[in-house]
Image: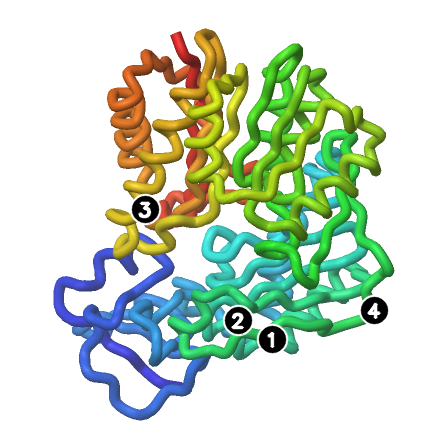
Amino acid sequence: MHVVKIKPGREKSALQRHPWLFSGALLPVTGDPKSGDTVKVLDCNGRFLGWAAWSGESQIRLRFWSFDERETIDRDFFRRRLNRAIQQRAAMEHMGDAMRLVHGESDGLPGLIVDRYGEVLVLQLLAAGPEAWREVLCDELQALTGARAIYERSDADVRELEGLPLRSGLLRGELPAVTDITEHGLRYRVNVAAGQKTGFYLDQRANRQRVGGLARGADVLNCFCYTGGFSLAALRGEARSVVSVDSSGDALDAARVNLSLNGLPSERAEWVEADVFQYLRLLRDKGRSYDLIVLDPPKFAPTVQHVERASRAYKDINLWAMKLLRPGGHLATFTCSGGMSAELFQKIVAGSAWDAKADMQLIGRFTADIDHPVSLNFPEGDYLKGLLLRKV
């Protein structure tokens, strides 16, 4: 068992049960722990702090499994943690047949994401710790859920920061010919092998329903629409028209399939393959306007190092959206960038309103749905932030 000691005065976050420790907090390490090894973490005086997974390639050198010295990090540990996460979501079954079962650090399993789509589980191993326990995790997940298939989508760029290769593929069982899910009465076809993230944006479930409730009689513009989640919610909410924009033709093809699955009026839906930044300007030049606009862009700022550049992008799209918004209309604007705080995002959006000469009221906020909990010891887990604005 490798022992890692922390520099004097650098143990505070661990004592507060934050699950990360960065490389600069560590004293020189004796021995040669391998990627994913469990190490015993002590303060400079030898006081126990926790059991953590070692990652020699990452700036996040330690991710804590447990702060209880009595625990052993073994198969039983992972079975208990997985079962706890799954059982906590048992009361959420009414939300549909798709949900997040394990949400990384906030479920006490740093770097592990597990999403369920009907009989299929999609697994993401985003750090060295869960990577080392890959087979155990698959065994226990299959035993606990009875899943027909487990598919791995460990193809996120963050793995490269861990010195891990990108990887995806079938781990257990056999994928069904199609994977359909139901969300608040709407059907979606999910491509777990090639879709974004694990195939679908489960975190926006409640927000789609909320935005759909604003759509009656509205002309709607849905930017970065992906496979049409907000668009379908708006059409079911009796929108007069919905224009959906995305740069991916494949995503738009999937959105059309979703539209057909639900028998929604295709004559009210327009699908546009375009760069959103350019298209917003084009719409302004054409004198178009809308009653409801959704901005749900990809992750512009995955880390704090990207925030400055991302800020300009967020300001740009929000400024043009506000110009296109009719008086009394609503703007639902989001960031899923973990490197951007809610306070900074609101400040950027306020700057957009100023530059657009638009009088905007903040009437609500959006977060990820309840199957994406945020540990109070890990505020970084609060990655999805959104504002609901009304133009005066």
Q: Are marks 1 and 2 in contact (CB under 8 Å)?
A: yes
Furthest toward the bottom, the residue is: 31
Q: Which residue is mark 2?
A: 130
| Camera-side residue of 123 and 321 | 321
Q: Which residue is mark 4?
A: 174
- CA separation in Å, label 1 and label 2: 6 Å
Q: Residue at x 82, y 32 (%)?
A: 262
- CA separation in Å, label 1 and label 4: 18 Å
Q: Which residue is mark 3?
A: 310
Amino acid beneath label 1:
Arg
Furthest toward the front, the residue is: 286
What is the number of the mark on residue 134?
1
Q: Are marks 3 and 4 in contact (CB under 8 Å)?
A: no
- CA separation in Å, label 3 and label 4: 40 Å
| Camera-side residue of 143 and 292 | 292
Judged by depth in the image, the label closer to the viewer, 3 or 4, is 3
Apparent side of residue 291 relative to residue 233 in the rendered image (left or right) = left
Judged by depth in the image, the label closer to the viewer, 1 or 4, is 4
- Secondary structure beneath dot 3 equals helix
- Secondary structure beneath dot 4 equals loop
How many residues crowd around disc 2 within 10 Å: few (fewer than 14), some, or many (20 or more)? many
